[in-house]
Amino acid sequence: MLITLCFFFIVFSQGILAQRILLLEKPGTFQNYKYGIGTSISVKTIHKQLKINGMINRITDSTVVIGYVHEVFINDIELIKRERYTVNLISVLSFIAGAGYFVLDGFNNAINKEYPIIDQGTIITSASLVGFSLILYPFRNKKYRIGKPWGLQVMNMSMQYE
């Protein structure tokens, strides 16, 4: 048992020692976002105006490899998009609620042989919920422009001296 624990400690401690983190921060505040290896990221570059989405595979002192294909210099990143989970959740739930209310009320009135099957109140309520979800759609992602308010840097979290 002790040999197994020592083996796992030696194998897994090497990955902990050489970890780098991409840090998006607003200086002077506590607002920051950390990106590590395996984290999903969406960036736009300055020079070629490329929009790159994918998982971070490698972080060096000056570059980030995204999706095993794109190696982007940190100085070339113009903006980073982050998903707003709360807005996304509210948008999806209101769309499901509006469509579900429309279908369930129509099905209930059809079973009970009530006419009209879809009345005006159902249309107004379900259209309001679906419309609200569509209005929230452009606000699902927040763009962070790299420059004056937001800075981007690599933090070397390794315990070794380089």
Image (cartoon, rainbow, N blue to C red):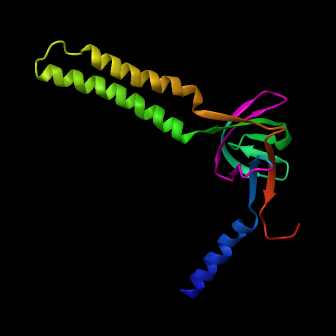
Q: Work out which residue is located at the far left of the displayed protein and give it.
A: 113
- Residue 150 is inside the magenta segment: no
Q: In the rendered image, which quarter contains the C terminus?
A: bottom right
Q: Position of residue 149 (x, y in %)?
A: 80, 40
Is 82 or 12 nearer to us in this picture?
Answer: 82
* Among the 4 quarters of the image, the one containing residue 126: top left
12 left or right of 157?
left
Which residue sits at x=63%, y=82%? Answer: 6
Q: Work out which residue is located at the far bottom of the displayed protein and give it.
A: 2
- On screen, 8 above or below 108? below
- Residue 51 is inside the magenta segment: yes
- On screen, 78 above or below 23? above
Which residue sits at x=28%, y=13%? Answer: 120
76 left or right of 56?
right
- On screen, 71 above or below 129? below
Is 121 or 117 nearer to us in this picture?
Answer: 121
Q: Position of residue 89 (x, y in %)?
A: 48, 38
* Among the 4 quarters of the image, the one containing residue 47: top right
Which residue sits at x=22%, y=21%? Answer: 106
Q: Position of residue 121 (x, y in %)?
A: 28, 18
How many discs mark residues in the rendered view? 0
Q: Position of residue 91 (x, y in %)?
A: 47, 32
Which residue sits at x=46%, y=35%? Answer: 90
Question: What stretch of residues is rendered in magenta?
Answer: 28-52
- On screen, 100 above or below 118? below
26 left or right of 135?
right
157 left or right of 37?
right
